[in-house]
Amino acid sequence: MSIIEVSHLTKYYGKSRGIVDVSFSVEEGEIFGFIGPNGAGKSTTIRLLLSLIHPTSGSARVFGKDVATQGPEIRGDIGYLPSEVYYYEGMKVIDLLKYSASFYDHDCRERIRELSETMELEMNRRISDLSYGNKKKVGIVQGLLHSPKLLFLDEPTAGLDPLMQRKFFDLIRAENARGVTVFFSSHILGEVQRLCSRVGIIREGKIVEISNIRTLQQNNYKKVRLTADGLAPGAFDLPGVTNVQTEDGTLSFFFKGDINAVLQKLSGMQVADVTIEEPTLEEIFMHYYE
Amino acid sequence: MKANIYLHEFRARLKSVLIWTLGITVLLVFFFAMFPIFADEAALMNDFLARYPQELRAAFGMDRMDLSTVLGFYSFVFMFVQLCLAIQASNYGFGLVSIEESELTADFLLSKPVSRAQVLTSKLLAALTSLTITNLVIWVVSFTAIELFRGEHEYDVRSLLLVLASIVIFQLFFLSVGLVISLLVKRVRSVTPYGLGLGFGMYVLNAFSGVLGDVALELITPFKHIDPTYILTEAAYDVPLMLLNMAVSLVALGASYWLYTRRDIPAVS
């Protein structure tokens, strides 16, 4: 059963676009990356799934239940970490966490203790006295303390130092290993690449691609770079070659197609150096935006 | 109803309730301490008041009240109490859900396993509890102040009870109208201007209604619907206006539920 099933979901804010005809599904136990630049509709999608906003058309199901009508039931098993965390300023950290825990049926005290130890959270400080990074930590503990089955992370690493980011990723991996499904929205491709098994790319409110990270990298073009004497820019005039650049006897280009064609051409040449690389997600991503 | 939201809301408003209640208490006692002077110098006082223009006296409802009697004086004081109550209840109404949005805590609350209706009911009950504390203190302080300063003057307890019983209806009006307006506008950035505007605006409307003798204005303002001078002199409510008042409150409440369950919570930006 798919944990999240989104079908033809559309949201307009008055006349301005949120998302248009978005469909995808997320399977149980996977870490699904949701990437796109700012304003592409990532947060809109998450807010629709949490019923914080209501769709203009289309529908979405989480745990097989309709978000429009069964929101409260669904949210009992959801943890949400927003990109910017804001809490009741006058409260102490521990009181906020207790308030948060009071919404769920089971006892969360042990989990709060564990998580705040991992994230090195000071429990007796007031929220208003916390730095941005520390508020973010409160957000992480708050999002996980009720042991949710599905996690929504909306650009979660902003404001965390590299050490905390690593701890956070370890925490997410550990949750995932326990069977928690993760919906990870980000515009930082490196972290998506590190964590996710599958990605959806959203651009201007529309899904442009959904695939495995691996296939996304494999089915895409290769980066070829070779050094040889007397190379002419036109030496690799093959179909599928783009972005040819020459510099000091080094030729580099992108290639999409059967890699054997390049290898055959190479075998007849006297080269000093050659590299054939998979592009980074970053480069693939830029490709979708051109 | 969710007990945890109710408690959280109630606690968040506790300080405000104490300040408002204390303020109203001071107002009642301070004003009523002057009653013996007014009562003893009744002739002088009425003579003094007669020098003011008729319109001005009408604006404060003083054309119909006799400040030398306990209830006449009480109705004068009670107008200011009502003004405080109106602003307090309006503030709570405007802030009820808008504060969560302006302070961006709505995401936290509404991503919990609760329905919008549960959230609103819990918040409304918490606000009503807060207002009821103020209400009850007014009951106690009113009787205490009257007993302390009335001297030999008698008064009709039943009429006073009628006035005091109207407080809850008065509060509910401003709470629910404030709430529905806060849900109709796109975003309430600061509660105080709205609260003051509604509370004071209604008060001024009532004053104008007194000056102009204009019937249309009476229909809008709770200061006219629940006019202490009328209740104390007639020993009864103005039933049609009272019903109108309650109808407006109920419609505002119903509309609030309708709007809030359909509301898009604005994102942080």
Image (cartoon, coloured by chain):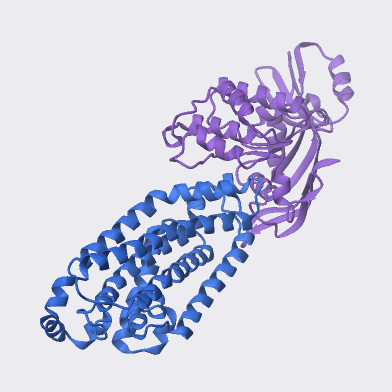
How far across and down, in percent of the image, does residue B4 sit? 57, 46
How far across and down, in percent of the image, does residue B261 sit? 63, 60
Residue at image position (57%, 35%) is A139
Vertical comparison of B197 with B267: above or below: below
Residue nearer the viewer, A191 or B158: B158
Q: Toward which corner of the image does residue B33 lie, by quadrant?
A: bottom left
* Colour that chain A carries in the picture: purple
Residue nearer the viewer, B260 or B7: B7
Residue B42 visible, this angle: yes
How far across and down, in percent of the image, does residue B1 sit? 61, 54
Vertical comparison of A84 with B255: above or below: above
Left or right: A212 with respect to B209? Answer: right
Q: Toward which corner of the image does residue A112 lie, by quadrant?
A: top right
How far across and down, in percent of the image, does residue A206 sit? 72, 49
Vertical comparison of A38 with B26: above or below: above
Q: Toward which corner of the image does residue A276 lie, by quadrant?
A: top right
Q: Which chain is blue?
A: B
Residue at image position (67%, 46%) is B113
Left or right: A226 with respect to A248? Answer: right
Residue at image position (48%, 33%) is A132
